[in-house]
Image (spheres, rainbow, N blue to C red):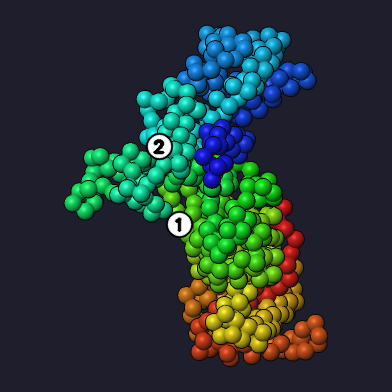
Amino acid sequence: MDFAKNADWTNMYFKAFIRYFGPFSTYQGIKDKIQTCIEKIENGNWDPGKQEKDDLKFINEKLQSNSYQAGFANIKKKIKNSEIYEKLKKNKLSDKLSSEELKNRLKELLEFINQPECSETFAMKSIIYTYINRFWNGKCFLLRPNAKKDMREVFEKDFSEPFRKYLSADHKKAKDLCIDCGDPIGPKEKVSIAFMNEVGDDFTRKRSAFWDCKVDAFLCPGCAFIYALSPLGFRLYVNKFVFVNINNSIGALLDANSKIGRIDQEGEKTENKKYSQWFAETINILLREKQQELSNVQVILRGVSADDRYRLSIIHKKMLEIICESRVSDALTSLAKSPFTKIKDNFVNVHETVVMNLLQHRDQYQLLNQLLKENIKEESKNFYIFWVYEVQLWTEIVLTYLERKERNEKGRELSMTCGAMKKSGADLRKAIMTAKGMTSSEGLRGIEYQLLNALAVRNVNKFMDVVMRLYSAYGSKRNEDGHELLIPTGFVQMLNDKQKFTEYGYAFVMGLVGSYEPKKEEA
């Protein structure tokens, strides 16, 4: 408590945000582009094209933005060589300058913005308007009248000082309670929770939601300070924030949301990532880190765009069990190495689609059907077909275990039967190609389409009609072991079981199409 009452919370706040968000900030982007331009000039590679012109434009515009100019006005008397910044406003960097002059100006500009006061001010201006305002607004340095004021001073006044005073105050006579922690608060200590985005409206204008129109949604200064820290509780991955609510222990909660280690290294910020793709990749990383934490997990997500909202998702224990199954995790790892493939005229992220199907409790058969049909045209999807089917197969095995407590027996039966069905399809494929003297499978396309269409609509009769005709025509042939081709017993089991029809039918068609064994990754 002595520490809390005397700590420099404002200094720690600024250092923490710069330490974590600084590498992703516009300020860092400016420094990187300046350094790149200098290196090109020094290495004799300066040939101003579109990229170089765009880099100079970025440096000019970002450094002269309204927020940066307001920050500069506050530190102008504390820094050296302020004329360098003022010069930029009058005489912008241009590719028309000689290489030597441009290099000198870039170097002096880099030295200027690397001053501690400039570094903190410009970095925080970027962080405030890119990350912090996604969580709260309308208060402190995000209150419009305070935009040109010293950021540290307004934060100290609005958050740090009230927090310290609250810890030392006597609340024996306080009548109001904090809406969050329930601790007593005095009339001058109350902080409206409305500054938090998507938590409440302007309570001074909209009181009808409260009993007798009396607003009671107030925070104590302690909770208000913690809410001001809220962006730090989320990991920034790609262009999304994520908080994984594994709340069975504080240790697990901290570990799951750690900002140190491989998770952050893999989570480099790149633009234009689809939400679902990011979600799939993030969950994959989290599960590799925290496979032992097998319980329902709540994931809170928020994008960095101004119009993004909070998203709440639950990863159920069953899905964690499935993804942690070694065969499924192996499949996801393989697909992640080469996630994209072309289906018709579109490139599809197979890895993303598979993970999202798992998380949304959908099977993989629609995706598998599309890949199989595409493979009929040019046999280039075997890698994807094999691993997608592996995910579907082991999903069913794990679910069977969880629901019926018979994983070993049922799983072996399902795996062995589906393996036998794939082998039967492969043997029939070889027999047909041998009988017709084919060197490619083009002559099988019509048959494969008929079977896939029957599977897609679960038409058992149509499927069996095609299969019976095939075995009638080619059943007298022998497989590699010298045995006659016989209709697999799995077909008998699936006649009156729609689920087995789908499981065994796709296994058989995989063999017939030529996806019996895993192939190398698609180039």
Disc 2 marks which amino acid? Asn
Mark nearest the camera among 2 and 1 is 2
**Compared with residue 490, is residue 12 higher up or lower down, i.e. above or below?**
above
Q: Is residue 397 left or right of residue 103?
A: left
Q: Is residue 217 left or right of residue 352?
A: left
Question: Looking at the rendered structure, which numbered label has been put on residue 137?
Answer: 2
At x 59%, y 85%, the residue is: 405
Q: Position of residue 233 (x, y in %)?
A: 54, 47
**Compared with residue 421, is residue 302 higher up or lower down, i.e. above or below?**
above
Instruction: Give the crowd class for mark 1: few <14, some 14-19, many >=20 residues within 10 Å.
Output: few
**Compared with residue 220, is residue 447 higher up or lower down, i.e. above or below?**
below
Q: Position of residue 179 (x, y in %)?
A: 36, 52
Question: Looking at the rendered structure, which numbered label has been put on residue 41?
Answer: none
Looking at the rendered image, the quarter that the N terminus falls into is top right
Instruction: Give the crowd class for mark 2: few <14, some 14-19, many >=20 residues within 10 Å.
Output: some
Comparing 236 with 440, the one in front is: 236
Q: Position of residue 464 (x, y in %)?
A: 55, 85
Comparing 499 with 345, the one in front is: 499
Q: Is residue 413 left or right of residue 464?
A: right
> Which sits earlier in the primary sequence, circle 2 or circle 1?
2
Q: Secondary structure at mark 2?
A: loop
Q: Secondary structure at mark 1?
A: strand
At x 52%, y 33%, the residue is: 10
Total labels drawn: 2
Disc 1 marks which amino acid? Leu
At x 61%, y 78%, the residue is: 397
**Compared with residue 268, is residue 87 higher up or lower down, i.e. above or below?**
above
Q: Which residue is mark 1?
A: 312
